[in-house]
Amino acid sequence: MKCRMKPVFRLTLLIFLMLVVLITGGFTDDRIRLHYNERPPYLITVAEGIVAGLTATPSSLAFQSAGIPFVWRNTPSKRQMHILEQNEGRDCLVGWFKNSERETFAKYTKPIYRDKPTIGLALFNNSKIATGWTLKDVLANKNIRLLTKNGYSYGKFIDNIIVDLRPNRLNVTAENTKMIRMLSADRADFMFMAEEEVDGVLKSANMLRSDFKTVNFLDTPPGSYRYILCSMKVEDYIIEKLNHWIKPIDQGTSPK
């Protein structure tokens, strides 16, 4: 005697199989993952799935204008670079500097923002360091302790001076807010920071602006350009479409 499957049972089985396929990844998400970490005023979460700021906004506009589906992912900065090096998916990072090492495993768009000249941040009562000195003189002084973030680039000019002069340096994996607390605890004398983010980071660290001072260096060049970096699995045509929609960020010839 043949056993016939009832229509209701067949429908239930079909729905079950579709759910299994969905749960096990049968339906792929083709959106590019756009990684960021909270960093006012560059990257600020304003609502679920929406990020704005000096580098976030031009990045979003480029993806949207080019018709490229994407999704924001809040990822620690150290983890972000590891993701690109692994090259396991279609991933991009927002607002990073360009250097020769990263060019070996990442694709770059045109620049999306240019920083003001990098400044130093120190406690207001720190007499070891002050505005009016050259960065080379400061880093050559072994009595001055520099605080840096491990794996982070401060732009070619500063990166090269650090390599050449080998300053008295504490290298950490912490984010800026924790680094500022380390300055406050006298674990270092100063750290590098973009002028744009000083007030926001001090506020996030629950520190008084009046307790800190910014230090301008005589030899610091104009700020570095920031880019969208993508894994090698992101197709070249995606980079080309983004470049088409990224607006020039200053007058004159844009850097490559």
Image (spheres, rainbow, N blue to C red):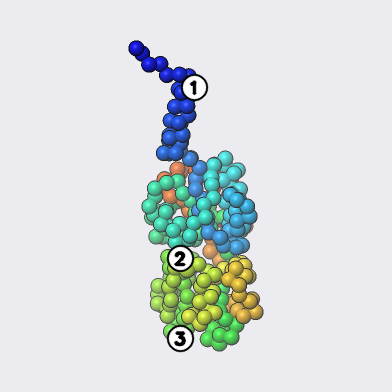
Q: Say which mark, if any, is on residue 143.
A: 3
Mark 3 is on which residue type?
A: Asn
Q: Secondary structure at mark 1?
A: helix
Residue appearing at x 50%, y 42% in the figure: 31
Q: Say which mark, if any, is on residue 24.
A: none
Alpha carbons under labels 1 and 3: distance apart: 80 Å
Percent of width and height locating residue 19: 46, 34
Q: Quadrant of residue 5?
A: top left
Mark 1 is on which residue type?
A: Val
Q: Is residue 99 above or below residue 186?
A: above
Q: Secondary structure at mark 2?
A: loop
Residue appearing at x 44%, y 68% in the figure: 173
Residue appearing at x 55%, y 87% in the figure: 127
Look at mark 1 in the image and give the residue it sits on: 8
Percent of width and height locating residue 88: 39, 48
Furthest residue in direction right, as rendered = 210
Q: Residues within 10 Å of mark 2 (few under 14, many from 20)?
A: some
Q: Is residue 96 visible?
A: yes
Residue appearing at x 48%, y 51% in the figure: 92
Furthest residue in direction left, as rendered = 1
Q: Quadrant of the N terminus?
A: top left
Residue 253 shown left or right of residue 13 in the figure: right
- Closer to viewer: mark 1 or mark 3: 1
Mark 2 is on which residue type?
A: Tyr
Q: Say which mark, if any, is on residue 152.
A: 2
**Which of these two is toward me, 61 or 135?**
61
Q: Earlier in the sequence, mark 2 or mark 3?
A: 3
Residue 256 shown left or right of residue 249 in the figure: left
Q: Is residue 105 above or below residue 237?
A: below
Q: Is residue 232 above or below residue 177?
A: above
